[in-house]
Structure formats: structure tokens, C-alpha cells
Image: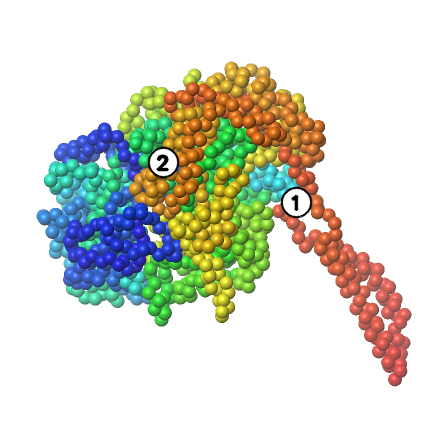
Amino acid sequence: MLRLRIRRRPAATRGAARLAAAVAAVALVLTAAPPAQAAPRKVPISGIGSTWSANAISTWARNVQANNIQVEYEAAGSTQGRVQFREGKAHFGVSEIPYGLQDIFSGTDSKGARQSAYMPIVAGGTAFMYNLKIGGRRVTNLRLSGEVIAKIFTGVIRKWNDPAIRADNPGLNLPARSIVPVVRQDGSGTTAQFTLWMSKQHQDIWAAHCRKWNKPSPCGITSVYPAKAGSGFVGATGSDGVSTYVRQENAEGAITYVEYSYAINAKFPVVKVLNEGGYYVEPTANNVAVALTQAKINSNRGSDDYLTQILDGVYRNNDPRSYPLSSYSYMIVPTKIEYNLTADSGYTLGEFAYYFLCEGQRQAEVLGYSPLPINLVQAGMEQAQQIPGVAKIDVAKKIRTCNNPTVSADGGNALAKSAKMPSACDRKGSTQSGTGTAGAPQDTPILPAARCSGGGGNTGGTGTGTGTGGTGTGGTAGPGTGAGPQLGTPGGAAGPTPGVAVVDPDTGEVAGAGGDAGAGGGEQVAALPVSLDGTGGWQLRHTLMLLAALLLVGLVIGPPLVSHAVRSRQADSWGER
Amino acid sequence: MIRRLRWRPAVRRSTVLTVLLLVLGSLAVPAPQAARGQILADDGTGASSAVTVRGKNLFPEDFSNLEITVSQTRDLVNQAVVVTWTGGTPTPRNRPLGVDFLQIMQCYGDPFAADDKDGLKFRETCQFGSKLDTPVMPFEINAAAAANANSREIRFDAPGYPAADEGEQLPADARMVPFRPVSCPVGATACDPSRTPDGSASSPFPNIKDPQTGADREAYTEEVLAPYYGRAMTNEYPFALTAEDGTGRISFEVQNSSLAPDLGCGEPYRDATGVEQKSRPCWLVVVPRGHHHSYTGEDVSLTGSPQGSPLIPSLWRHRIVVPLEFEPAAGSCPLDRAERLTAGTELAAEAASSWRPALCAESAGGVSVSYSPIGDFQAAREILSPSPNAPGLIYSSDPVPTTASDPPLVHAPVMLSGLVLAMNIDVNLEDGPLPPEVARLRGTALSDLKLTPRLVAKLLTQSYQRDVPGNGGKALAKNYRSIKEDPEFLDLNPVFRSWDRRVSVTINGLMAPNGSSVAARALWTWILSDRAAANWLGGMPDGEMVVNPAYIPLFKGEVPDYFPQADRSCFQQVHQGETYELCSSELRPRTGGFGRGAAQTLRGDTGAYAQFLNVNVTPPKFEKLPREQPGFRFTMSVTDSASAARYGLFTAQLCKAEKGAGNTYVATDCRGATKEAISAAAGTAVPSAVQGVSVIDPARAWSAAGAYPLSLLTYAVADTTDPVDARRDYAKLLRYAVGEGQRPGVTRGLLPEGYVPLPTAMREQTSAAAKRLEEAVAPTAIPTPSDNSVTPPPAPALPSAVPAPASVPSAGAVPSPGAQAPSPQPTPKQASQLTQGSPPGGIRWVLLGVLVVGLVGGVAGPILRRFGTRYLPTNVAE
């Protein structure tokens, strides 16, 4: 578990007006009544919770130091976040799931007496980071369907060359290696997100796993992953723990569920997951944004779970670009002055929230998350109004100046609109794209039979691509929500690397189709699942083998012969006597 | 600015109470020792605000030999200052803590107010009493510890003590010295109520709901204080221990009003005469604790302790006060200003944080620049990414190579720093007669540690038994349990020969960050450039130890750019039929980054789990090791020089060692991460694959005289095809970075400690790069590439020459609508390869062998038999 403590120098000189205001405020304090009612002060605040969103929160905390806001965030896991917040040990908690869900393994954690509200903070995809090699070469383009993922993490599929995995990956010669599922052993929101998805989408598989622990069916969500030591599963603590395990050279065969940014940081690939649209996709910021357009939000203001997510629509989003395991994280903010909350800490928390809901969302993508869509930003700001001591704002007005990357002129989600169509090669079927993922963008060779041929690129184009004109790539503007393939874009001839016959997916044209290059490419058969001795020739080991064999023969027939020789000599000498 | 002081500062000020008379400036401080492995900062002016003060001789303790030096007392921000002292009585290490230590805290208020001679109002303005943990000492002498020494409570829990101190002015039934937040300054009678309650009948502690049970109960004292400060944020130092030689050293974190708003240090205020002042002064207060009964004067070192909170008048009278002047804390960037995004290696983090507020000031151009820490390699991808949300400038210690189809980049050197092995080691010696030069170090913070590439390799490869769950089994059976037993280490650092023998008193693994970085690669490159270390990593025993076999394959190919944790074994314990496992990632967890690693080192918090199943909880679990206590810490981490400096950590020296006479190792050439050694390494930089960009090769620096091999040059890399106003802002950043941003100092905007100012030539290079970036031709046409093999595409993804938008990157301007993600053809690669990772080993020959034996035996047996009978000499048989 990590604990981040950010303390730094204060900020830049501010304008004269600000200084004057502060001086006036202090003067007011000195001359007048109780200070609590005076100008609010920025005080250090502390939070605890999710490791899923820790990379984003600690980056925001670092950036607001320049504004004299000191935020200390401890990434101890969502479960700890809910507990510590409830007990008044932190100013805010961060969790992937709300209080009060019926956890099949660890019971229900109640909201407790502390009054609070949920505020969405950042979206992202729960990714499947894996360590797999074929012929000594890292696989970067693995594709799996949801069912296979569920079976892997319930111990049903145990080998990488399982027919179901091969069916997802026609372009890979998968090795007969054991799968090592790596799960979180601490209470984790990532686990909760993952098991929620399994319970909704693959209830039969998940329930069968639960029955091993004598849990009744149907089986629901849990924060503590059920896995027994010695059953082929490996448990690790924290997102850092699982990603550290998987990335080790000798952890070949391992796979874990973790937030996308951890895979990027480790330079590792993630699984392209099959969506309802029939495509295998990666949890990029854009694909998560697309998926979350179907997130239902509890919009019942009277409900305790106001603004919590209902993700069924996300799981089943049939947009070809949608990443099914998309979700967002909440901050649990206090709504009453009690425990350690003062008006000052409420004010500071509010300032922090205004920052990360707007400007801070621009940092989401580079960190491997997806920015919150504007409707959630707006709802989050409205929630912030409930924090005691917050500087109240006109939310509608603030939204207009909010520098959120999902905002577009026409009100839609800019990020979702700009999301690229997945490669036609990654449509469910007999072809597979070699493109790498996450932290491992390098390509993986594809078996010839599964390669996209010249025309094949076009077949999958049931685009919902939408052009937002302006920056002009030349002619794809206009919403194309129909069936028309958005592929034959004239003008944008992307340059392939020389020597490889490539179908440019942007253009649908065969680019650089030199005969030699094409043939060369064809020869490069993807991978070999068996151990082939590629070195050849007589080597030391062969000499050793021969020697060993000779020795053995000597050992077997040597002693009798020697003994015989000795005896016969003795016999001779006796005979002479 | 901060200069590290020798244990015995040359400057002495005999100041008894008259601290105000201290001359604050121009104290001649001895030249810092270059070879001590410290990061030094020098503002070049030679001015220092170090202050030395002396204790008093008041009944029943004589502290007049105690001299305390605070390394910096002016222009303070939120930072560490080093407090060192001499002439103290050594803290005994063989009894519960209670006598002869210092208590250090920060206070506002007026220590010299005429109406407050005993400082009883002043003590209410001190941030103290959060009940931080008391170090656990060996229990060889059964003496009572000092009760309540870490609190504000005023009761004594000891026989022979009065019910209340006679100097006490609080109500007779008061239970705690109240805290008075600054927003209600001393003297402002109108806001007396905001002083915290003292627990008396007239000012009772509030009732609260118990957070666990929900039941109503009276608040504990630390809960009464919680709205103002608490364990997590307080900077109080209740137990600063004195070493055998009477010296001590701690890093004290001074806090301005942004971290300690209820002290208000550095805030504008109105002084006693009603005049507006820019920055409220504060005080560092040291309360020395002796070994005499506070009231009888009896020496209690063998039986008990002077009891109670340091705020009790009888102890408070010994206080030593040092003035602290803060830089005005006011001023900040507007939070809603649109930001320019930057991201990149954590080596840039400290400087980026320092520069951000300064850049935000109108005088520097009013640019709000955010920074996100990401790995160098990811940063290189981001700068080439066409996404409108990608950063326009990244920091990387590797140049970013581009192809013809990529946007042209500019590279500008902006920071020079290094990777270090930071340490927080309290010298813990065994009892018994020791050579005086060793005994002297007892209880001090170890400042000098020598390591060789091979020793670092051993620490980073789980080769010491303690670093492997289950202790490594057969493969490591002959290895040492920890570095504390390694002869090479002991020869280079002889103090460890007298180290506490207990198994637990050693390092729980060298902490290293998760994630890939150029810095990690540099560390491995340095290790592998040393022949002894490289051979050892390759599997050759060095006569002492073998490398953990799980690591051998990792060094055969490319140099790793991360810190592997390759040992897969897990410690297993069965309890009631269930198996519980503890694996490497729990036994030796990776840190979340350089900064976090340095913070954990300072706190003595490895986050590691103990190899011991706690069966007293349901379900049973492995428990985390507690934070190591002051006086008993032994933590080290791989971090960067700026993070180490920020947390006031000493750093190890990297040495070349040879076996000398008597078969012992002798260090022949040691390099600390000093300004000189890092500058020397910058001089060895060689051109890289990217034209005009040079990088430091650790192997080359290691072979150059006096160069610190893990020095790293960090480049800012910017995209020349960004919109013109963005490029203008990033150019401002570059100019700032090599201008004011290279002036060392702790003040915001300057170059933080741990960085070394760039050589002039590199600054000029950056200025030129800023110019190029600003004046780059608007990217309607990409310059024709020299590479003639491919015609570059007309850059569909790049923003064309749209008139520069008035504000920062507009989110609406999204390129490449609805296109498909690329799905290129596989890159050709040699087809036939050895499958790695699962070599079947010698076992594959077993079957063959058995078959051969069988065959030979089967054929030879009968034949031999026949031979046997035919030639059997008949006379013998008869």
C-alpha cells in the first residue's frame, strides 16, 4: 500500500487585489468576531481509498500545491477508504462502489452515521494486464471475450492454448502454458467492479465459482476476491502489487485485472475485450468515454446512492468502440460539520473539487484514465455545493468555462465522438490485428491465415464515426452513423514502415505494396508454440550427450569384462603354480 | 540557504534566553564535506541563516552545555530544516525511553511577552500533543518511562509527583494545556472561546460519538485537537534522541500556514503595535529532557523518568527558542486558469512543482503549467500523440527519436540531478566495550555508507535470505541473511561489525519504485559495467554468495529498465487446514515512485508484511510491519537526489572496491551525489541517437575521475507543430527553467535542493531551443524529411494552421474524426526462435538415458553371461 504525503512550498505571488483581500480578511479577524465566520482558509485535507484512481488523485494533489492546497491521499484500497471515512479519519474517501452493497464474502459495509454524498471524480477502464510470450516474443495483441475472461478468473480455463482462447485469437499460436490469474487479496474497488461485471454478464460462471465457497446463487458483488492459495491463483496487495507481479520476466502466463494506467506504467499490454458490437477493444480514454455514454446514473436526489453508477448499459453497449468494463470512481464527500470536518477543510475540499472536475480532467488521458463526461462534472459540482463551507458557485455558469476535454460545441461528448473505430481486423471472426496495446505498442506477428487482406479492412466498417470538423484531415467530416464504411478517406495516406505490405486502415488502400515486401511479410510466420531448436549444428550439449552415452555403455559392459579379464589372469597364474 | 552542518559547528553563540539578539545572517559555516554523500545546495551568496542556541542551567537540570543549531531560520517555506546539537547527555539505549532526549515543536505567539514571563500563554500556541508513538527501547534496566511525554495532558501518573505543578495557572481540575489557534491570537480577548477546552468543569471536553461503536463518550485529548492538527499532519518531534557522543541530528519539517493554518506562520498579520506585517514569524521550541526528578531533584536515570508533558511549567522552563522567519505564504495561481499540460519523469517533479507557482506569476508570463508524473517511455509516446489532451511538453532522461512521419521535436536540457540510494539509518550498536570511534556513533544518524555495484546488485536481486519469502531455500542456503553479515559490506563499513546482533535490527529490503524509467536502466547499466557485479549477476559465485537464480536470465539481453522482483516463491503457513501465502510483493513491496520512496524512507515505513501469520484475528492474516521507531530505523530506497534532499535524507556513496591486504575489501574510489560529482558526470555526456542531444552514460561516468555515475540529464521535449500560443507558453517555461529556475534555493521558483545547476552551454542550448520552438513555422507543411524511402503523409492528425485560439487547447478541436485505429502488418522478425521461459532442463535426457541403459543391458546381459560360463576356469569352479 502506498501512502502519499504531498507537502510543498507554497504558491506564487498573487495579484495585489488578492493580497489586499487577505489582509482585509486578517484585519477583520483581528478586529472582529469569531474567526470561523471570517474568510475561509485553505487548510490541509486528507483522503484515503481507492488505488484504482490513486494515480489521478496524487497528480491533482501535486498540481494544486501551487495554489496553497495541501492534499494528502493514502491509497489503501476502496474498502479502507469507506471504513476510514465513515470513522471520521479522513476528510474524504474514494471508492469504486458505494456503501451498502451486499458483499457476498465480507458482508455489507454500512454507511454509518456520517453524512455524506457521492461525487464522480474520474473514469477509466478496468484492464486485463497479462504476461505472455510466443517464441520468446511478447504478445501484445491478445483478445478475449467476456466469457473467457470470466472462466479464466474462476479457474475453468487453465491453459493459454484452450480452444476458447484460440477462437478469440485466430492469429496467434498460443502456447500450452498454464494461466496464472493474479487477484487482489486486499479489499478492493477494482475487484468489486470486476465481480460486479461478472455477476451481471456471466452469472452462471461466477455462481459456480462462488459455490466452491458455499455461497448461494445467484452470486453478487464482492470486494475481496475469493481465491485459495495453491489453487493456481496468486493474491497480491494493491494495484501496484498485482501489476508488479505480472510484469516480472518469469511470471509468464500471469494475468490480472487492474486500472489501465498501471499497465501503461509497466510497459505491458492489456487484453482487447470483446464488446457487444462484436469488436475487441482496448480501454483507451476514448473507448471508455464511448462506453460510458450508456451509463445510467442514479438521478434520484432523494436516494442515498444519488449519482452512483448503474453500469448494465455500459456492459452491453453495442457501439463497436465501447470498452465493456468501463466505470468511474467516486469521492465520498462529507455534507455535515462533524468528525474532523471544519468549515475551512470543507472550503478547501470544495476548491480541490472545482479544480479536478474541470481543469484536472485534462490530465486524465495522459495518466491512462478517461475524463468524466460533462453531465457527471455538472452533477459532481452540484454535489460539491453540499459540502459545508464550500465556496458556492453558479454551476451552470461554471460549466460554460469548464475546460473539460469531453465538452463539445453541440453538447455531445467530444471524446466519444472522436473515438476511432476499432480496426476491422479486430472484429470477431477469422482475422486479428497485430497492433499492440497499452504500454506495449509494438506489433505482434499474426499467422498468415488471420491477417487482414487488402479488402478485408473494409468489411468491418459499420462506423458510427462522427467528424468534428475544424482541424481537417480532409473530408471525413459529417456524422456517419449509418452503415457506410468510414474508411475510404481520400487524402490521408499514412506512411507504413518500408518493407511491409500494409493495408492502411485509415485509407483502406494497400500501401507500400511492393512485391518483395509483401512476400517478405508473408514469410514472417507469426510464432511457434513449441520449442524448436533454431541454432542447429553440433554443439557442446551434443558432445556431452555422446560422452554420456559412451560412459554408460562402458559402465554396463565394462565391469563384467574387466572382472572376467582379471579372473582369467588369476586363473592363468594359478595354472602356472 | 540550507547548508548541512558538521556535528560541531564552528560558530557558537552563547545565547541564554536573548535569542532576539542573535545575529541572523553571515554566520561562517564550515565548508560542507564533499565526500559525505550529501546533496548540497548553495545559493552562491555565502549567506546563511543558521542559528545556534544554548540550553540553560536551571534546577534540577544543567543544559548549559547543550548547543543546538538550526540549519536555516529565514525565508522558510514548507520544507525540512536540519536541527543538530552537541553537548547533550546520551540517551540511554538500555531502558525504556524517559530520560535525556529532546522534544521539538513549532509555535507562534510571543515567547517574550512582558505579561507572560513563564511562557504559559506561549505554550498554548505550540503544535504539540498528538501522542505520536514512543520508540520502544530494549528493556534491560527496569525504569519507568516518561508518561504523557508526547501529550498536552498535565496530570502525572507517577509516585512522588504533586497533583498539579505549582506554577500551573489553569483551573485546578484542568486536564490538558489547551491549544489556541492563531485565528484567535493571544491578546485578542474577544475570541477566547475558540481556545480548545482544557477538560476542567468550566471548560469540559465535548462529547462525541465513538467512531467505532457509535456510542456517546467524552472526546480524548487528541480528538479535541483533531480540528487543528493530528498525527497525520503534525510536525512535532516528541522524541529526538542524543547519541553516545552527545550529538544528535533530526530533519524537522517547518510548516507555513498552508500546512499548519492554525499556526499561521508566514501569513500577513497585524503586530502588537497594530502595524500590518507581511509574514507572521514563528518559533522552533526545543524542550530538553534530563534525568532528574522535576521536583525532588533526585537522579532517576536508573529508576524512573522526569514525568509529564513538556508543556508542564517545571519542564517548560528549560525551553530553548529559535526564531523562524517565513517567506510570505500568500499568493497562488488562480485555480480555474486553463493549464498547459506537461508530463514526464519523476526526476522533474520537484523542480516542476517549484517552478509552477513562479511561472504563474504575471511577471513570468502568467502561464499555468500542470505536471503529471509518468514514465520516460510513456512520455515519449505522449509527445508524439496527436490527441488534443496529450501534453505539449514532456520531461524525459532519454531523447525522443522521431521518424519522418512524426512531428519535429525540440529537445532542451532543463535539469541535472541523479539517482541515489537514500538512507535513514540510526546507529544501533551492541552492548559491551567498543572502540571509541565506533561507540561515539551510537544513536547517531548514519551519514556515511559505502556501497559497491555488487552490493547494490545483491540488494536488488533478492539474494540475501531475508529478502525472499521462506528465506530462499536451497539455492540461497549459503548466502547471508542480510547485508549486515556480508563481509564486503562490513569491510567497507566497519561500524556494522559492532551492530546490534538481533536479527530484526537490519534492513527490510532496499525499497525501489514500481514502473519503468531511464533512471532504473541507468542503475543497472552502472552495475553491469562493473565486471565483478556483472559476473556475479551472470551466476558466478563471488566466494561469498550466489545471485538468486530467478534473476540470472534477466541480465542476458537488454538492460532492464525497471526493478524486477523475480523470485516467485511464497512463504506458506497452514492454519486449520487453510493455507496462507506471503509472496515477494508483500514481503518487499515496491514503492509508488521516487518521491513516495523517499517519504517512506524518512518515516521508516517500508509497507512490508511480516513473515508471520497472525492467527489471533479472523480470518488469520499476515500483518504489516509497524513503522520503524526513531532511534531504530534502518531503511533505504532507490530515489532521486531531489526527493532525497527534500526529505533530508543522507545518500550512500558508490565505491569501487578491491581485495587488499589481509583479504579484506578496501574502497579505492568513492563517489557521492555531490554537486561536484554530478557536474563532473555532466561533462562526460556523449552524443545520443538524436542529433544535438547528449546523454550521460553511467559506465563512462564511472570510469571518469570524480563523476557520480548515476547522474541524469533531463530534457524537456516539445512539439513544434503545436498551436502558436501553446508553443509561446512552453517557450516561456523553457526560458524560465534555464534562467531563474537554475538558481538554487528553497524559495518557490528556484532550483530545489538535489538538483545541480546546468552548465552554461546547456542553458544556451535550451534558450536556443525555446527560440526554435516559438518561431517554428506553423505546421501546414511538415519539413521534407531527409529519409527518402517513404513519402510522409500530409500529417492528417496534426492541427493545421488554424488561427491560434485565444485560450488554451480547445477541447473541441479534435483531429481525425471517425477514422480507424491503425492495424499494421506484423514487423518481420526471425521466424525460428527458442521458446523461452520454460526450459525443460536436464530432465529431458532422463528417458533417453534409461532407454539406452535398458537396450545395452538387454543386449549385453545374455551375451556376457554366455561369455562368463564359456570361459569360466574349470579348475577354479571345482
| B325 displayed left or right of A273 | left
3D distance between C-alphas at marks 2 and 1? 52 Å
Tag 2 subunit: B
Dot 2 alpha-carbon crowd within 10 angstroms: few under 14, some 14 to 19, many 20 or more? many
- Find numbered disc 1 in the image and state the secondary structure of the residue it sits on: loop
Q: Amino acid at mark 1?
A: Thr
The reply to whether dot 2 and dot 1 touch (C-beta < 8 Å) is no
* Sequence-earlier tag: 2 or 1: 2
- Residue toward you, A85 or B401: B401
- Identify the disc placed on residue B736: 2
* Residue depicted at x 18% and y 66%: B298
Marks 2/1 same chain? yes
Horizontally, is B793 left or right of A471 in the view?
right
Determine which of the numbered discs, if any, sits on residue B835 in the image: 1
> Image point 28% across, 55% down: which residue?
B29
Residue B855: x, y in percent? Answer: 80, 57
A193, above or below B87, in the image? above
Q: Evaluate whether residue B712 shows in this view.
A: yes
